[in-house]
Amino acid sequence: MSLRWLLGRAGLWFSVFLIVSPAILFFVWMLSLSVKFEVDNAAYPPVFIPEHFAWSNYTDVLASNRFLTYFKNSLLVTGTATFLAMLVGVPAGYGIARMAARKSAVVILIARITPGLSYLIPLFLLFQWLGLLGTLWPQIIIHLVVTVPIVIWIMIGYFETTPLELEEAALIDGATRWQVFRHVALPIAKPGLAVAFILAVIFSWNNFVFGIVLAGRETRTLPVAVYNMISFDQLSWGPLAAAALIVTFPVLLLTIFAQRQIVAGLTAGAVKGG
Amino acid sequence: MTSLPHAGPLAAEADASLGREWRPPSYWPFVIPALVVVLAVIVFPWVFTIWMSLNEWKVGAPTTFVGFANYIRLPNDPRFVESVEHTLVYTTLSVLLPLLFGTFAAVVFHANFRGRGVLRAIFIMPMMATPVAIALVWTMMFHPQLGVLNYLLSLVGLPPQLWVFHPATVIPSLVLVETWQWTPLVMLIVLGGIAAIPTEPYESAQIDGASHWQMFRYITLPLVTPFLFIAAMIRMIDAVKSFDIIFAITQGGPGSASETINLYLYSVAFIYYDLGYGSAIAVMLFLLIVALAALLLHLRQRALWTEIGGAA
């Protein structure tokens, strides 16, 4: 029995190793690429831990003026698009849940299955006509396509599960619907707010399609900026890997510290932006 | 999130209803701001796309109504037909492989072991990480001379591959990235399903001396089928729409060997600026997703009937 148990444990750990190693190896290799000089990155067989670390890959990326601009662009686009989505999406999720109008969420389903590029064609023309190209506004507005459905969808799910008794009691005591929402429903739904916020931030931060069409030289977000590094830096892997790691680092950090919220959000609605 | 401009209208409504008999104020004011946004950024683009697809619409040229001419052009456009084939192959593989590995991973993560939380966080990192950043590193790993993948192959005695640099291996290589990236989502969905299964069937099966495989095959698998189906549906939608990974790694190449409908749509609309034709492709892409979803639903229905038939 104990031998069988031991074998079972060994099998389990082997399976765990098998499953997790692709992710671990990838990110370790990404880190390794980013701290090596070109000599080491071009070596065969590959060097895993270099003798000399090329920290300059990081400092060069961080020190360039452009990087700061792109970082600010990313912050502004993701921040504003998420803030606006929370502002309109949270009350909407509440209203839809209380009206039991889940069918109206079919629009969100359609938004979910529509390829991002389909929005780009008409909105590109609209932004051109409004003269907004060249500013950050087109990207902020189009990122709402990603953030608003996520927030509404997750909030519907949360408000459907919060108890009605308290809200009814407050209504009978003469509170307005707005006061009930603000002082009764919203505080209870705090975990839901966190889930919606985190997922909206991640999917907006990661978005690439909208940027390649709408961003100009000065309005690129980080994913677009990193992509554009390839064209003129074809063979300098170190700085490129460092830039890629810097771009995705905030998201990886969030994944570790907000794992519970992310898992809850993804399995509740299984929504993904873009 | 402290104050919203809708307290005003709500209060006004409450005042107005004081005189008449009391009825609960409506929830509409909560929904209207979002409705405006959804109409502007989701519904309007959709209606406009359909309208554009019926026009000859090129940037810098006058537009003319051409009816279904853009749609009639599609089946006679070899590049489009080819892109449909690529999309179907890419999608099929990108649904099946993550489903297979994701189910296995879910069974493993359902077990109790030390460090499960941290390992699960690491496991879901690929799907949360910025796709373009990931794609860049995969491109380096695919490099035929300097890439680490060919080195790994050489360790187990396999010949080096050209990966994304050869027309025959480019789609499987991209599917490898897609599978690596999205297996975690399938795992999470299936794990949710496994966690919901009561323990009694397993206990009685254990008493009857069932093996792990038998318990998985006859208890777990049938009970998580609905979750597998949901996972397949989501995976299908995302695989058909896949853009970032393909664009960043191959841009549809070499030649047009990995050009899916979405990639072709990008070229038509934003390189050739043929917006009318691009819109027609966008509509067809959407319809393809709807058709595949219907097909999956149909398969699910049939599977249900065989299950019932088998039980009877």
Image: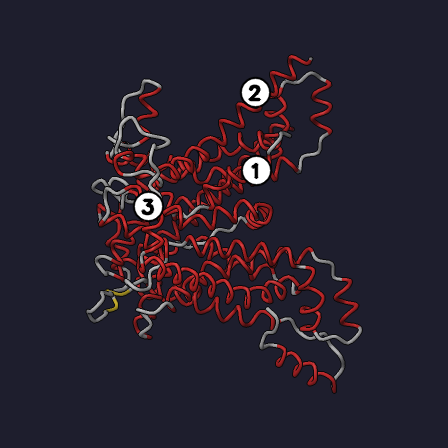
B301 or B45, which is in the foreground?
A: B45
Going by the image, does B222 lie left or right of A78? right
- Mark 3 against mark 1, which lies toward the viewer? 3
- Residue sitting at x 61%, y 64%: A96
Q: Amino acid at mark 2?
A: Gly
* Residue picked out by circle 1: B118
> Element at badge 2?
helix
> Element at badge 3?
helix
Percent x, y of residue B128: 47, 46
Question: Is label 1 on the same chain as label 2?
Answer: no
How far apart are the alpha carbons under marks 2 and 3? 41 Å
| Residue A1 placement: quadrant | top right
- Residue sitting at x 59%, y 68%: B1
Question: Is label 2 on the same chain as label 3?
Answer: yes
A239 or B164, which is in the foreground?
A: A239
- Mark 1 against mark 2, which lies toward the viewer? 1
Q: Chain of mark 3?
A: A
Q: Amino acid at mark 1?
A: Val
Percent x, y of residue B207: 73, 18
Q: Amino acid at mark 3?
A: Asn
Q: Which mark is residue A11?
A: 2
Q: Which mark is residue A57?
A: 3
